[in-house]
Amino acid sequence: MADLLENLNEEQREAVTSTEGYVRVIAGAGSGKTRALSHRFAYLVNELGILPGHILCVTFTNKAANEMRQRIHILTGDNDTGYISTFHGFCVSVLQEDSHVCGYPKSFLVLDNQDIDQMLKMIYEERGLTLRDMTFSRARDMIEIRKTFREPMYYHDLIAMSLASLKQKYDESRAVSDIIFYGYLYQQKKCFGLDYNDLIKFTLFIFSRSEEVKLKWQKRLEYIMIDEFQDIDQLQYDLMESLCGYHQNLFIVGDPDQTIYTWRGANGKFLTEFDAHFPHVKTIMMMQNYRSTPQILHVANSLISRNVNRIEKSLLPRNAPGPKVLCTHEDTAEKEAKWIAEQIRSLESAGTALRDIAVLYRAHYVTRVLEEVFRQEKIPYVIYSGVQFFDRMEIKDALAYLRMICYRDDLSFLRVCNVPKRNLGEKRIRFLKQKAEEEECTLFSALSMYREDPIFRGTKAREFLDLVERYNGDYAGTSISELLSSLLDESGYEEALRTEGSQQRLDNLAELKQSVFEYETTCGEEASLENYLTHIALYTNQDVAETGNRVKFMTVHAAKGLEFPYVFLCAMNEGIFPSQKTNTLEAMEEERRLAFVAMTRAEQRLYLSEAAGRNFDGSPRFPSRFLLDIDPDLMEWENRPKERLVEEASHYIDSSRKQLEEDARRVILEPGQRVKHRVFGEGEILSADEKQKCYQIQFRGMDTPRSISFRVKMEIL
Ligand code: ATP
Ligand code: MG
């Protein structure tokens, strides 16, 4: 027990032992907030005797949740680690228990992007749409935006309307976006599928419908703790407020300098104005940084102090000095990647493990060059964001087999019924779809019903049916890893890969089995197939099984809350970081906070790099303003950019800043105002969207309103 408080400073101890009421920790990067949070969990369990299942601990990513679970397991020695999850993950727990309140079965599906694409594919086929009408990724965005901003009450339809009425709405839709949107809702309802946008809404809906259910959860969760509170959004806030209503024990930690999700609706005010909304809030500050060398901290402080809209606070280093932050300018992105590879080689020969090195970047596309060079140089790496492990074809296939056993849903069916080839091609699938429609059943049931139909002669439909039916509810006694192995074996899936000679894919499947096995070991009795599938469905891009001794590549967003001994922050160029899309002063400050988050991930040494070249629009590429923000004495340069380039860059940055300032001063037009657009002509402003920085304008002679950016100059009539 002594251990629990021993390795904490005074403020952390106070945070850990202030268990009752509303407590807020505001503190800088690496000051031990997350550490205080996990120790507090252990303190509640070990000292106060609270059952872990009565504590909700919310983290920002699944990766963070897994790490937290392991830490707490070590501290408490208890296998039951309660609700340690993301908001989304927690909502899945609520829904698994109480989805009946909104008429959904317990076996609802959590949809990921691939599932959504499958549904889109069906809609496109049915309605003759092509990717030219809208790409899948745009369609997904459109659905999200529509659910978030335009039709925030959509879920009432999803819950209340019958499948037939949703279908009718879909059938009656004419505009492309309506077809896709209502087609998607229809598909969702058909398989009781919920996407990320739905989870919190459905949970709030359940609480609003059933006082009894709400009270049950409120009573159960005696203590609530939330990490990374600066990035909470309105829905999450509402959920949290509702959950802590009974016991009123809420502990939150955050750092206003690390707010990096306002573009997705997060609002730092929830943290800074927390004391105005809850009674008797105790606020604890932590000023010391335990993570980084003074050299790294000075650089990060020097950068973030350039933000105007910010509460002044500096991080004080605790750790011993290290080498200066190392920077370089190169002529091309390829040379920059080579430089990084070289530095990594020399770190390696000095005894650093590759897994202790992270390469961070603002935008996914930066990895292409990095990957090429790292492959040439034979430096092993793993990408934590972008196309990653759980998005690979063979992994999705394998998981679809598991889902098939569990849910027999249409999505999984379509994914695996003909993989490996069972001669169930398009014609037969069309037949099944029609029958399923007529009988109002799943594709699997339709196949089962019509298995004797001549259309299935000469196919391996029967083998597939047998395979799935063999495991019919009878997998309870088998471990998931065994189940997975026998499915991959008996389905002939692995055999087909072997015939193709796809060793890489077989290796990935082996990796999947290993990760299932690890999951079972950490979860113990909780490791049911349903739980595993839900757990996997919640995996986001930043989550990859920790594998081997490899350099970690990830976006800065994905690196949030993490730390690495060595950090390379690359492609520090105008147009990349800050991103090309940064079009307001606030957005620019958010980009700077993002760079700050990136730098404060480093423990021992930080490397910054950039390269000349051309942007996508052909303009020359300048060093990032964030590099120029930093006091030059704090950095060591390997190759300095030429004096002239720096001058040109400063000039460019200056004029870009002035443009942003001018835009900020421009009065925002009120709804009702009439304007004239250069191309679209006269119109009336219907609304202004501060977040998207655009107006909805109804132009004369157009059927629907259009979104026009604030930046576009229009004549005011
Ligand atoms: P971020 O804002 O980046 O999420 P944080 O405030 O959550 O950072 P932690 O991750 O909890 O910081 O801690 C940073 C590092 O400092 C960790 O390696 C942690 O183990 C270490 N640390 C925290 N508190 C102490 C302490 N009192 N003594 C020694 N090491 C500490
Ligand atoms: Mg943290």
Image (cartoon, helix red, strand yellow):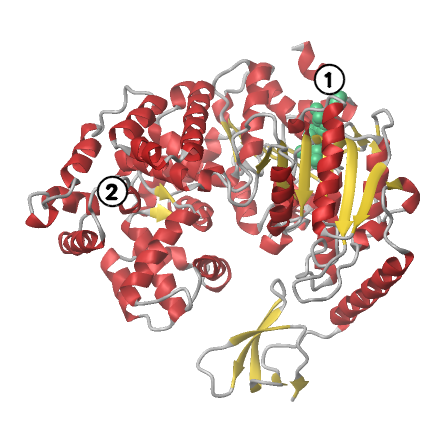
Question: Is ligand 1 within 8 Å of the beta carbon of the residue shown at mark 1?
Answer: yes
- Pick the residue in front: 626 or 609: 609
As drawn, 26 above or below 146? above
Amino acid type of the residue that numbered disc 2 sits on in the rendered structure? Lys
Please name the residue shown 75% across and 68% down the image.
664
Q: Of helix, strand and loop, which one carries label 1?
A: loop
SS category of the residue bearing label 2: loop
Where residue 293 sits, quadrant-wise, is top right
Residue indicated by mark 2 = 421
Q: Quadrant of the C terminus?
A: bottom right
Q: Looking at the picture, which amino acid does disc 1 mark?
A: Asn
- Residue at x-position 82% and y-position 47%: 303
Give me the C-alpha separation between circle 1 and circle 2.
58 Å
- Quarter occupied by the N terminus: top right
Residue 351, image quadrant: top right
Q: Quadrant of ligand 2?
A: top right
Looking at the image, residue 530 lies above or below residue 312: above
Q: Position of residue 424 (x, y in %)?
A: 20, 47
> Is disc 1 surrounded by few (<14), some (14 to 19) or many (20+) residues within 10 Å?
few
- The reply, left or right, for residue 145 in relation to residue 415 is right
- Estimate the x, y position of residue 663 in percent, counting from the top left: 74, 71
Q: Which residue is mark 1?
A: 7
Residue closest to the far right: 633
Left or right, 225 with reference to 703: right
On the image, the x and y values in percent for residue 584 come to: 71, 63
